Amino acid sequence: MIIINIGELTGIVPEGTLRKQGAEMSETGTIRNAWLRIAPDGTILDFGPMDDLPGAGLEMGSSDVSGCSGMGMGGPTLALTNRRPAHPQPGIPTDKQVINAEGGMVLPAFCDSHTHIVYAGSRQGEFIDKINGLSYEQIAARGGGILNSSDLLHNTNEEELFRQSMERVQEMIAKGSATIEIKSGYGLNPEDELKMLRVIRRIKDTVPATIKSTFLGAHAVGRGYTKEQYVQEVIDMLPRAAELADFVDVFCDEGFFTPQDTSRILQAAARHGLRPKIHANELAESGGVQIGVKYNALSVDHLERAGDPEIEALKGSETMPTMLPGSSFFLGLPYGRATDFIAAGLGIALASDYNPGSSPMGDMRFVMALACIRMKLTPVQALNAVTLNSAYAMGVSHLTGSITPGKRADLIITLPGWTLERLPYTYQTPFIKCVLLKGVEFQTSPPQA
């Protein structure tokens, strides 16, 4: 495949770069009026300016070259199509698929490294509680929050849970996410936690997006347990969870699990080969960041209450600080100190935290907008945070997350006239022409006959 007449090809990163930190967060490669070739295996082959394209003759607006079919306005359905040019083009072999970007931007597809999208039903009743002034902690103390989702999930069979979750996955892909981490954590007992992990595995086997699975048995204390009993129950779940999950997570925060609880779980998880990703510092300065760094967590996530001690703890580590501005927006929490982290030489990732109680959306373009508007990141910094660095926070930045030869061609092609600066600026204007997953177009509606 070859994509031609790209108005702006952005998100170009040199081979071997796995994450951006400090001043690197403000850098990304860009080529204007570009082309990009995709190898038969769905990886990026090469790219460059249109003036350097062999066999120039594929001019802007050529009627002989296919464009994307467009994303449409209907609900997402999982459908993939290959498109070929209607007639041979000079310099392009006739067995090649050609897409005319018609001046649209091409950028890496989003990577969303923190979601809870396997859940049942809705918690919209709690939305009214929030409007009436109840805090996240107050709702949880009344039996709402995570325990509410746990009850709903327990009463939902596995097939229906898969169906509901697939709708969210397809919605996220349609909005530009090609790599998604999904957590368990609404089961809170062995049977239901494993049910969630099986659903995530089935999603992984069904969709062409890259899916990573995290065992979050320690999301809250399950009903009928003391905390001590439940920590041991989570440890006892680990052998079976490790057969299905890529990572382990603990909600290390005020009112949930302490650093000591977290340490016990992570020590046991290490024996089963599960690397940590930690919920930390959402509600208080919990020590979650420090315990995550101690156990070489791939990421520490939330960080609404993280300050100078957490910045110091992260320096020199392999752990990616990950901020979730959708939760700050929905719950009225402080936004993470992203610019301070970057000024201290750290990188950050951004993720949606898509879940039914505190961030009910999976739109990474809106996450970019919140990062720019409320956290004062530049568009380039926000792009690096929702692509390469978020891929790093899932352990896949060697495979995706940037425009780099050899990486998966997970790409967004925009409508004509878009630029990187405009994405977070006019953040509700439709901008996607099509999404490519490993070089193949994802469609939200069946192609027209």
Image: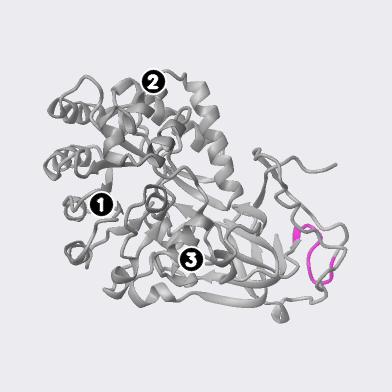
Residue for badge 1: 297
Residue for badge 2: 154
Left or right: residue 194 versus residue 366 is: left
Decide: is 273 above or below 17. Answer: above
Precedes in sequence: disc 1 or disc 2: 2
Real-space CA distance between mark 3 and mark 1, rounded to the nearest whole angstrom: 23 Å
Real-space CA distance between mark 2 and mark 3, rounded to the nearest whole angstrom: 38 Å
Q: Secondary structure at mark 2?
A: helix
Precedes in sequence: disc 3 or disc 1: 1
Amino acid type, label 2: His
Q: Which residues are magenta?
A: 89-98
Instruction: Determine the image quadrant of residue 237.
Output: top left
Q: Residue at x 36, y 22 (%)?
A: 151
Q: Residue at x 47, y 57 (%)?
A: 367
Decide: is 24 above or below 374. Answer: below
Residue for badge 3: 383
Q: Whole-percent x and y of residue 444?
A: 68, 43
Q: Main secondary structure of the magenta part?
A: loop
User: From where the camera sits, is residue 67 visible?
Assistant: yes
